Image (cartoon, rainbow, N blue to C red):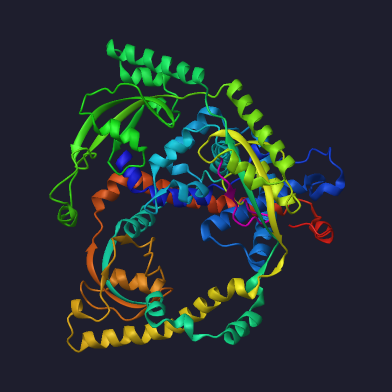
């Protein structure tokens, strides 16, 4: 069953995400107004109940953050207006759902939150899309499980709040749309498009390569670039940008903190040597919340798995059935046991890359091992935290006295971190929200007080920040964007060249040139399905339809993608195996049914909106110059 679930993970995540819309994150304190605040703070009134401005602004912040995380871009004016409208609609939807769930007594228990957080099918998009959760551009479950094992991490707190709000919504959706049914033929069609895969050999006249080969960016002088700059000023509008720097004084565990953890792990090791069951002790004592409930099971790991080098060194030094002695990593003390091991199958290219002489001390890359572990963390005592706070205050006073941030920091052997540009609706880095708030409202060169917080690696400590610069809202300076303009113009011109090159290559092929001898070297895709499309060639409907209907090895017509013009032939096309559908039909039905339920629930929400009396106060905040 688990193999089937993993195989259909992308589909399930995709359809579940349609059903699961994030609420206001409770951990950040966004609440519906209970009438205790003055009316001037209301962004809206719904059926006479005031909705505080902070509820709307938090929703807009979340949408903007998701947009930037997904696209890597800052919203322009048009996109920002669209996000504002989405935030408004979602605020109203959340109001409807919150009231209805409360009326029906629909809540989320701690055990339900744990089950949802551990089930990869129910992860929110901001987790699965996060680069910090990826290995080789793919979501990495092991990274996610390690993320869950840092309970003081603000993003874990955010995830818990997400489930505390979305689980009641999911329950409500299930009740509202309980009558939806999935016809068998509809499920089979969905299955076929998901399961059926093709592998292509393609010839692409890549526009980026054309720009590079022809040095096209040198074709435009400043006059041409400025002409484009003036004609497209809306592209270069930017809100106020702020830049800061900060230091982090980590609260490190004291000797007695380490000895306490060492004593605990040693006692567990003694019990294991006496014959106690590893899984039972892991369930009872391990402080890794991601694995303790399943007996410390980490599954099979490889030499290139995303674990610390020390952990992998200790693990791969053992054989099946072996038990390690306690050892220390940055996460705490571990004991590991090897449940199983198996040889890795190697492809021919991998075999050819192997050198004749291998480092005898290196990790054995020819096998993967099934690992269990027990983790005992080194807790940071109040004494250690107090010590870090004292040091932070001493450094702060030295900076204030000497009026030289960089010198004092250097004298104390600390690292200075500089932020990326900080916008009103964007954090500048992976640091405490309170520090980001300081940067948003500080004056140039202003120094913060000490700010307690958690670093990205879940280390507790204290920040001291200083705002370096403020760049006002308006047009980006021409010199900031001239290289970007040159590249945009060059890529546009390269598209015309790409079309001619693709046409020429196809003509050569028709005149007898062998496929492998085409001037533009053919490349091969990995197998991909109907829904995914291809990361280079795209998912344009004519291209996808052709890829699924063209005869094997027949050359296609020319298609256009964002990367240039291309043509292809199908190297492999795996037909659908109906037996797999019969084995997996439960998951397929569940996926399609979730989509149907989402559509029914959306229709119910729209109908409920028509029954509300809504007073919109957004113009009041715009007139005050508030950022919406």
Where residue 188 sits: x, y (%)? 34, 55
Where residue 309 sits: x, y (%)? 34, 38
Where residue 476 sits: x, y (%)? 66, 70
Viewer-proximal residue among 381 and 268: 381
Q: Quadrant of the N terminus?
A: top left
Q: How many marks?
A: 0
Residue sitting at 29 percent across and 30 percent down? 314
Magenta range: 414-427
Lateral position of residue 347 relative to residue 588, left or right: left
Q: Is residue 78 magenta?
A: no
Up the image or down, 520 lies above or below 156; here it is below
Residue sitting at 48 percent across and 48 percent down? 16
- Residue 462, can we see it? yes
Residue 152, by quadrant, is: top right
Viewer-proximal residue among 404 and 321: 404
Lateral position of residue 184 relative to residue 80, left or right: left
Residue sitting at 49 percent across and 52 percent down? 596
């Amino acid at each position: 069953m688990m193999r089937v679930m993993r195989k259909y993970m992308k589909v399930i995540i995709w359809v579940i995400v349609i059903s699961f819309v994030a609420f206001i994150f409770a951990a950040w304190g966004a609440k519906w107004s209970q009438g205790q605040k003055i009316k001037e703070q209301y962004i809206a009134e719904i059926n006479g109940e005031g909705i505080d401005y902070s509820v709307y602004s938090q929703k807009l912040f979340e949408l903007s953050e998701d947009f930037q995380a997904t696209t890597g871009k800052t919203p322009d004016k048009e996109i920002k207006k669209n996000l504002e409208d989405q935030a408004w609609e979602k605020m109203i939807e959340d109001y409807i759902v919150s009231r209805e769930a409360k009326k029906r007594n629909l809540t989320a228990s701690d055990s339900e939150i744990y089950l949802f957080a551990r089930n990869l099918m129910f992860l929110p998009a901001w987790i699965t899309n996060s680069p910090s959760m990826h290995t080789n551009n793919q979501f990495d479950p092991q990274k996610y499980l390690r993320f869950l094992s840092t309970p003081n991490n603000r993003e874990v707190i955010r995830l818990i709040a997400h489930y505390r709000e979305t689980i009641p919504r999911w329950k409500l959706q299930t009740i509202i749309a309980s009558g939806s049914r999935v016809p068998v033929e509809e499920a089979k069609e969905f299955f076929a498009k998901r399961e059926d895969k093709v592998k292509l050999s393609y010839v692409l006249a890549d526009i980026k390569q054309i720009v590079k080969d022809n040095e096209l960016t040198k074709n435009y002088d400043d006059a041409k670039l400025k002409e484009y700059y003036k004609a497209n000023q809306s592209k270069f509008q930017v809100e106020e940008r702020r830049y800061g720097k900060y230091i982090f004084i980590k609260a490190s565990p004291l000797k007695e903190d380490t000895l306490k953890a060492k004593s605990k792990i040693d006692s567990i090791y003694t019990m294991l040597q006496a014959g106690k069951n590893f899984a039972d002790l892991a369930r009872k004592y391990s402080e890794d919340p991601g694995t303790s409930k399943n007996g410390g099971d980490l599954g099979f790991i490889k030499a290139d798995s995303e674990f610390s080098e020390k952990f992998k060194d200790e693990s791969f030094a053992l054989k099946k059935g072996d038990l390690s002695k306690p050892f220390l990593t940055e996460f705490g003390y571990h004991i590991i046991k090897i449940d199983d091991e198996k040889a890795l199958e190697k492809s021919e290219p991998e075999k050819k890359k192997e050198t004749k002489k291998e480092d005898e001390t290196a990790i054995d890359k020819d096998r993967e091992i099934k690992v269990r572990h027990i983790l005992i963390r080194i807790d940071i005592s109040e004494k250690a935290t107090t010590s870090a706070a004292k040091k932070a205050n001493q450094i702060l006073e030295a900076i204030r006295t000497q009026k030289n941030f960089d010198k004092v920091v250097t004298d104390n052997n600390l690292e200075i971190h500089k932020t990326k540009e900080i916008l009103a609706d964007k954090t500048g880095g992976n640091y405490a929200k309170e520090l980001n708030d300081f940067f948003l409202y500080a004056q140039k060169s202003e120094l913060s007080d000490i700010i307690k917080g958690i670093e990205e690696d879940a280390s507790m400590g204290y920040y001291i920040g200083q705002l370096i610069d403020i760049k006002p809202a308006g047009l980006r300076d021409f010199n900031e964007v001239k290289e970007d303009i040159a590249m945009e113009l060059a890529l546009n011109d390269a598209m015309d060249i790409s079309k001619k090159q693709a046409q020429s290559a196809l003509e050569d092929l028709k005149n007898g040139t062998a496929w492998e001898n085409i001037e533009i070297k053919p490349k091969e895709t990995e197998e991909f399905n109907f829904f995914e499309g291809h990361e280079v060639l795209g998912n344009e409907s004519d291209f996808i339809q052709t890829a699924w209907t063209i005869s094997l090895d027949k050359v296609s017509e020319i298609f256009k993608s964002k990367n240039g013009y291309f043509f292809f032939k199908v190297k492999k096309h795996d037909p659908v195996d109906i037996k797999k559908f019969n084995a997996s039909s439960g998951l397929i039905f569940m996926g399609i049914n979730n989509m149907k339920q989402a559509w029914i629930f959306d229709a119910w929400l729209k109908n409920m909106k028509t029954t509300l009396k809504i007073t919109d106060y957004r113009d009041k905040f715009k007139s005050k110059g508030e950022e919406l």
